[in-house]
């Protein structure tokens, strides 16, 4: 029986991963360690509460004693825990440095002490910075532009150093933008969907021509499962969706899916150092035999429907965001046209 520690397992990608793994790998026990900060939500895992293969521990990955306790008896670590919202990092970088750098260092050190057999470190394409042409491969230089991306790049370098110096069997993954169920509604897709469902506008940074590569979260989970079995320690693997869209085109598709006019799309002032384009080269992982399975249109439609069906999950989170001094995007939204409110459901 494999024993896996999942950090940040109550967050968006982490909780999807826990559900995916328990559904596809019956011979695993999972220990979730999560601090339950503003974006961590036990409701994301409530359907697993009675599963004997699942254990939840509330704790901070910067707490060495807590990490050692959580990791005891585990042979594998999958490290999702991170502060991840760029806007928040611009306002206050300190929590990002604490969690994404110091927390990663603690986990790697305890993993070395406890002789963990495999350590999957989950990173992001944002560490490569802006890619105006072509796509970034795994040997591409790290040029992060936001405090969030810089903190993740630092965590990646610590993971590489742990492998080189102490032979901690680390595998680093860098994925493109994820979307799907249970994503906290400050991120662009759930923010736009829930704003439209509430009858307000969607705030679009600048000219809206910033390009992102979109990856269905279930495809990301499948890639991580694949790499637990096929990945080579010391290697880095890009996980891209292959779906490049401008933010304006993304907003347009979401308004169409929700039956509202494009007049709800409202430009707002751009954020500082907003990277114009990200694009991942996923050929290394493809050569191993993995590719994403979900078509963008289908996965976006399923995501829209999930938020339609789960207002009870996201509505309280939106109320918290409205009172959150970091989250200014909601305060930029104005009531939309009456017909938009009626058709948004």
Image (spheres, rainbow, N blue to C red):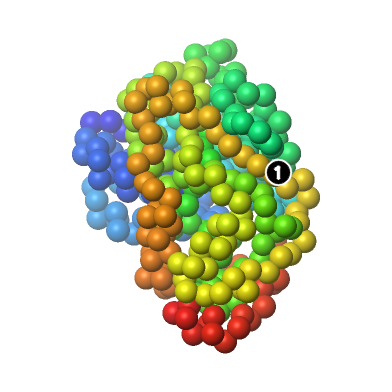
> Would you say residue 80 is visible in this rendering?
no
Hey, which quadrant is residue 181 in on the image? bottom left
Hey, which quadrant is residue 147 in on the image? top right
Q: How many labels does the image show?
A: 1
Residue at (47% x, 71% y) in the render: 258
* Percent of width and height locating residue 247: 61, 55
Residue at (60% x, 83% y) in the render: 337
- The reply, left or right, for residue 47 in relation to residue 345 is left
With respect to residue 233, does 44 lie above or below? below
| Quadrant where the C terminus is found in the figure | bottom left
* Percent of width and height locating residue 334: 67, 78
> Does dot 1 land on a helix, a strand or a loop?
loop
* Percent of width and height locating residue 300: 43, 57
* Percent of width and height locating residue 307: 43, 66
Residue under label 1, please give it: 275
Residue at (32% x, 45% y) in the render: 20
């Amino acid at each position: 029986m494999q024993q896996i520690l999942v950090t940040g397992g109550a967050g968006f990608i982490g909780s999807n991963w826990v559900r995916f793994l328990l559904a596809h790998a019956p011979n695993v026990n999972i220990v979730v360690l999560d601090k339950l900060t503003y974006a961590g939500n036990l409701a994301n895992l409530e359907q697993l509460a009675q599963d004997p293969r699942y254990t939840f521990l509330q704790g901070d990955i910067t707490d060495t004693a807590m990490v050692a306790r959580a990791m005891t008896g585990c042979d594998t670590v999958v490290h999702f825990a991170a502060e991840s919202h760029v806007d928040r990092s611009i306002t206050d970088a300190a929590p990002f440095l604490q969690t994404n750098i110091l927390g990663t260092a603690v986990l790697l050190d305890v993993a070395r002490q406890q002789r963990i057999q495999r350590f999957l470190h989950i990173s992001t394409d944002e560490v490569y910075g802006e890619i105006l042409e072509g796509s970034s491969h795994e040997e591409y230089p790290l040029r992060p532009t936001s405090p969030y991306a810089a903190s993740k790049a630092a965590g990646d370098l610590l993971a590489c150093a742990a492998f080189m110096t102490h032979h901690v069997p680390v595998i680093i993954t860098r994925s493109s933008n994820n979307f799907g169920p249970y994503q906290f509604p400050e991120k662009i897709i759930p923010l736009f969907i829930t704003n439209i469902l509430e009858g307000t506008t969607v705030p679009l940074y600048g000219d809206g021509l910033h390009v992102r590569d979109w990856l269905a979260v279930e495809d990301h989970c499948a890639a991580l499962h694949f790499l637990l079995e096929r990945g080579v320690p010391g290697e880095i693997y890009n996980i891209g969706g292959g779906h490049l869209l401008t933010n304006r085109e993304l907003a347009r598709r979401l308004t169409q899916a929700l039956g509202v006019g494009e007049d709800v799309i409202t430009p707002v002032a751009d954020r500082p150092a907003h990277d114009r384009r990200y694009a991942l080269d996923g050929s290394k992982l493809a050569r191993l035999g993995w590719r994403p399975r979900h078509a963008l249109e289908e996965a976006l439609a399923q995501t829209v429907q999930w938020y339609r069906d789960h207002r009870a999950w996201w509505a309280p989170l939106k109320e918290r965001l409205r009172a959150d001094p970091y989250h200014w995007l909601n305060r930029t939204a104005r009531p939309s046209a009456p017909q938009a409110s009626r058709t948004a459901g």
